[in-house]
Image (tube, grey):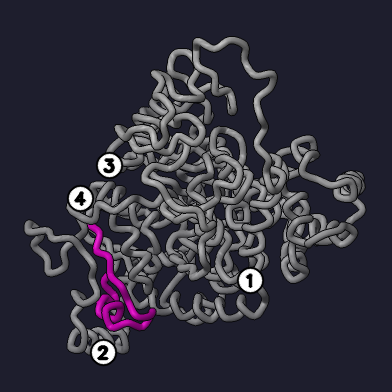
Amino acid sequence: SFNSDRREGQGRSDSRPSYGAPRGEGRGGDRGSFNSDRREGQGRPDSRPSYGSPRGEGRGGERGSYNSDRREGQGRPDSRPSYDSPRGEGRGGERGSFGSDRRESHGQRDAAPQKPQFNRPRLSYAASRIDQVQRVLGEILQWTYPADAALSHWLRGHPGLGARDRSEVAEAVYDVLRHLRRYRQFGESGVGPASRRLAILGLAATLGTEALQEGLDAAEAEWLQRVLQIDLATLPRAVRGSIPDWLDERLGAMESPETLIEALNRQASLDLRVNPLKVERDAMLTELQQSAGRYEPVAMPYSPWGIRMEGRPAINRWPQFENGSIEVQDEGSQLLALLVAPRRGEMIIDFCAGAGGKTLLLGALMRSTGRLYAFDVSAARLARAKPRFARSGLSNVVPVVIDSENDARVKRLAGKAQRVLVDAPCSGIGTLRRNPDLKWRQHPESLAELGQLQERILNSAARCVAPGGRLVYATCSLLAEENEVQADRFLASHPDFERVDAAEILAARCDTLKLDGPYVQLRPDVHGTDGFFAAVFERRKKAATAAEGEAEAQADAEAPLEEGVDTAETPAAQETLEPVTAEASAEAPGEADQDKPAS
């Protein structure tokens, strides 16, 4: 899959119609015969009568001679004698060339086979690929749906595309999204539809210009050569890096903005995490090096559970994935578990669980003991997490669908949790390697709205932390207003919490990880991860406030926590709320741990 490591949890629907397989599909055995573009099962597009067996079919389902449309076993419709070998068959029962209707006993072959006449020319490989990418971009650039959802919808509507075709289309589409601003500027001097010029530039970058030559007319070929001669160093930074001005302003205030922007425009590697309940990393690494060595699996530099691979293997078909031994999770996301530092038997809350990637690791580090609540406002996201929980072998996870951060089920846990993780909804700017469309879907106004939501969630989650307990706030953003500003604001308004040096916590576990405290800020250009931020707070050891006690009492009276819990049956469970077990849903697993950022 291409770039499918977003953040977990956003399901999308698409009402747009799907299309049939585009004419001229690529080589590799996927291309059908010319003009055979009717959907399976449809009738003839003209007025000719339908016969019992379509023209050209022979006995046993193989194609026979031209015009041999009789049903098997029927006699000839005219007075001509029947022969042992039907017209058009060669020696050994194989079909001969079109129009070569002599029998084996005949003499010379016809001078040349007749060539069928077509109504329109066949699309070349290059022209077909340009057409396909142009169609996908036409849907995505409406910005109605996230790019991954729109692309998946289009591919589902074209089941005739082979693996190579799908990969080439996806890579070109994502290249255009990464460099959209620059490509649009280049396209201003071209001819034809703007979406076609974008498709040409994306394919030229991913396949090379030689592969496109037969699909371009003279004007397009000349324009492409002019574009390739442009010196990118002469372009403004925002155009060169293809980011909007508002984002260029914010990233420009950070250290080494040029290298950061360049890293955000590169394709991410595939990051895997082993399940500590089932396998050790070194053992899994050896296994993958033997079975998937061409993807170059190596141990991650920081996460003790991580394996990094190059390329885009379809790991959801691997037995190691199907049995829950490995999951897809970015290294930065894995490191959050070290900051939470869960212990056996504790009560822990994953406040924005999404599709459960971080929940899985926390539960495994708890050795499937204690109680791990997975809160989320989306029932669909938690439903997608159920098969992952089942594969993992965990028995301590309790998924809970909440209405909002102020849900009564949240208030009932006031002052009870030893650990609370808030992986807050955010802009997702740190994940642009995987979700390049986010930079075009976000804007300053949406950042302001997200900031208010993050503050409300953090305040609500803080009420659940027991005295002496730990609160971890995290985002997949690089922007200060979602990160340091939020953390400082929280400390200023919560004197009962104190800041813990998060960088020091990680340094104690990862001696090669160099960070400037007290917060953690990971960058793709420095650490090779997605952009991540984390802050750690601990609640001073004192009794809960009177207000929290009243809130808890009211919540107990109004809404039992069992409501909204989506779990499998666990007869052996002794507590009121039952955790998810391996008896949960058997639906097809999701491939990636992607807590999707807000968009």
Q: Position of residue 503 (x, y in %)?
A: 53, 53
Rendered-image quadrant of the C terminus? bottom right
Residue range in magenta is: 396-416
Which mark is drawn over residue 550? 2
Secondary structure under badge 3? loop
- Res 331 seen here: yes
Q: Which mark is residue 442?
A: 1
| Circle nearer the N terminus (4, 1) | 1
Identified by mark 1, the residue type is Gln
Query: Could you say whether the residue bearing mark 1 is in a helix, strand or loop?
Result: loop
Which amino acid does the dot numbered 3 rest on? Leu
Q: Residue at x 45, y 43 (%)?
A: 509
Is 400 contained in the magenta span?
Answer: yes
**Which element type, helix, strand or loop, lies under badge 2?**
helix
Q: Nearer the viewer, residue 88 or 316?
A: 88
Coordinates of residue 45 in the picture (x, y in percent): 53, 57
Q: Label 4 is placed on what type of residue?
A: Ala
Sequence-first disc among 4 and 2: 2
Q: Nearer the viewer, mark 2 or mark 1?
A: 1
Q: Earlier in the sequence, mark 2 or mark 1?
A: 1
Please tell me whether residue 307 is drawn above or below residue 141 in the rendered image.
above
